[in-house]
Amino acid sequence: MGIGITEVARGMALRVEGEIYTIIEFSHVKPCKGNSFVRLKLRSVKTNNTLERTYRSAETLDDVALEERKMQYLYNTGDTYHFMCQTTYEEHAIPVALLGDMTRFMMENMEVSGFVYQDKVLKMALPNFIVAKIVETSPGVKGDSAKSDTKPATIETGATISVPFFVDVGEYVKIDTRDGQYVERVKK
């Protein structure tokens, strides 16, 4: 469906050169001489690559009805991860290639966001932060809480992250899933 360039908004999905992008930023520019135009900064739904495009105010774009659905992670079988849509209760089998690095932080029953177009899941997104239990790390030493050094630790999903020396096995930590960094200890 075509929309006018003046109707764009942040977060809207568009088809550009056959691929689906979401609008990150846009700005309407009205120069002193000449016609106005719109600059768009777009992010690919599949690859997360960014793209910048400029459009004249008379142009139309191909709008895409991209729907964000809350999904619950159920289990995995080899290279396929299974999710259930929270609203329709449909089960979706997602290949590990689509999930990429986010499988490091997948825990059973975790709620994630699925971006769906024509009943096909194009992308999955983890919550920004998760709380996970430390299952393996070297023991902490009394007095290490003031140091800024870190040590490797394995969390319950099997992923290895860097944590401060004072964090021990059995403790829960908050992790930023966007970069895999330790945020803080959490009491549970």
Image: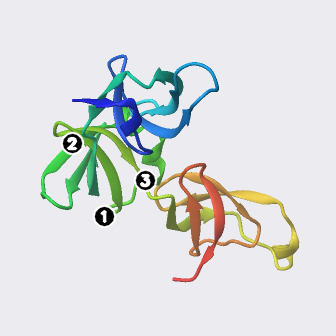
The location of residue 117, given as percent across then percent down, is 23, 37
Determine whether 184 is above or below 43 in the image.
Answer: below
Q: Residues within 10 Å of mark 3 (few under 14, many from 20)?
A: some
Mark 2, residue position: 93
Cα–Cα span, label 2 and label 3: 16 Å
Viewer-side residue, 51 vs 138: 51
Of label 2 and label 1, which has the lower sequence position?
Answer: 2
- Find out whether the residues at labels 1 and 3 contact each other: C-beta distance under 8 Å: no
Of label 1 and label 3, which has the lower sequence position?
Answer: 1
Viewer-side residue, 102 vs 124: 124
Determine whether 99 is above or below 133 in the image.
Answer: above
Q: What kind of residue is marked 2?
A: Ala
In this rendering, position of residue 99 left or right of residue 33:
left
Mark 3, residue position: 126
Viewer-side residue, 58 vs 82: 58
| Residue 47 location, quadrant | top left
Secondary structure beneath dot 1 equals loop
Cα–Cα span, label 2 and label 1: 15 Å
In this rendering, position of residue 59 left or right of residue 149:
left
Secondary structure beneath dot 2 equals strand
Residue at image position (24%, 39%) is: 65
Cα–Cα span, label 1 and label 3: 12 Å
Secondary structure beneath dot 3 equals loop
The location of residue 95, given as percent across then percent down, is 29, 35
Determine whether 108 is above or below 39 in the image.
Answer: below
The location of residue 42, given as percent across then percent down, is 48, 32
Q: What kind of residue is marked 1?
A: Asn
Mark 1, residue position: 109
**Mark nearer the viewer, 1 or 3:** 3
In this rendering, position of residue 4 left or right of residue 65:
right
**Mark nearer the viewer, 2 or 3:** 3
| Residue 39 location, quadrant | top right
